Image: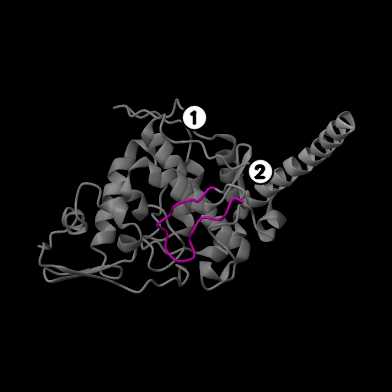
Amino acid sequence: MRIVLLLTLFFIVSCGSPKTLVAQETEVMGNASPQSDVMETDAPPGEDLPNETPSLDSISKAPIQETNIPKPEPVKTTGVVEAAFDHSAWNELLKTYVNVNGDVDYGSFKADRAKLQVYLDALAANLPDESWTREQVLAYWINAYNAFTIKLIIDNYPIKSIKDIKDPWGTRFFKLGDKWYNLGEIEHKILRKMDEPRIHFAINCASYSCPRLLNEAYTPSRLEAQLQAMTIDFVNDTKRNRISTSSAQLSNIFKWYKKDFTTGTSLIDYIKAYTNIAVGKQTKITYLKYDWSLNEAK
């Protein structure tokens, strides 16, 4: 009897244990949640970066591939800047279809889209690598942002605002190398990480309140002078900033990207470096309403 009793107990224990283990494993798996990459951004309304899971809209425009954007750190700065990429085709298009005020003749640009596509194809075939200087990398990505913004507008033209386009900064509609990109990734994941806040006055969002679109290509050899000139131009442009000794009615760009302008300084001190107006601690800062209407030549 004792032997039979022991065998019975052994049978009960051995049958029950696996069920207990399975129940525990199921509970753990049920409570697990997939990890997600949360991308911190200080973007203006509607310009937030998309989730890693693309929208159906994005899929319909381009097959989504892995979007590990190469880090822009391994670039070197040299005294002599040699050309790594020829932006002359883009320069010619800008001279032809953009006036000195930064207004764009989108209708004519659209009619000449084949020339634009040649330049975009060249960008796609010549991504920056670690041999490029910092100036070469910055010029490449600034021009790429502006050129693909033009493409986005003329692909949807006629429109009254870039915001008439669904998810204009989040849709991956162009391919560089073997990866699909969107405008938000160029701005937030590449350019803003290069610690050059003046890029905000060089990239153009096709809107009236944006810094004007320079009617020439950014080039490595002239980049410093171009960025400096565009920053001075924007800060002192009374259509976009209204500054006096007592008040500074600033573009929302200074609000949206405040942390980019205030590394080691204050916003007033940053502004002060680019204007002859005596601004100081007594100057009250407010922000102007942003006009998203299309920067179209009339």
Tell me the amino acid under the disc marked 2. Gln
Residue 89 bears which disc, if any?
Answer: none
Magenta region, main secondary structure: loop
Mark 1 nearby-residue class (10 Å; few <14, some 14–19, many ≥20): some
Mark 2 nearby-residue class (10 Å; few <14, some 14–19, many ≥20): some
Q: Quadrant of the N terminus?
A: top right
Give, as a single range, the part of the protein colored magenta.
37-52
Q: Earlier in the sequence, mark 2 or mark 1?
A: 2
Judging depth in this view, the residue of 143 and 195 nearest the camera is 195
- Choose top left, top right, bottom left or bottom right for residue 266: bottom left
Q: Is residue 6 above or below residue 115?
A: above
Whether residues under marks 2 and 1 lie with C-beta atoms below 8 angstroms apart, the answer is no
Q: Is residue 243 above or below residue 214?
A: below
Tell me the amino acid under the disc marked 1. Asp
Residue 65 bears which disc, if any?
Answer: 2
Q: Position of residue 162 (x, y in %)?
A: 52, 66
Q: Is residue 289 left or right of residue 250?
A: right
Q: Residue at x 56, y 44 (%)?
A: 119
Residue where numbered disc 1 is placed: 129
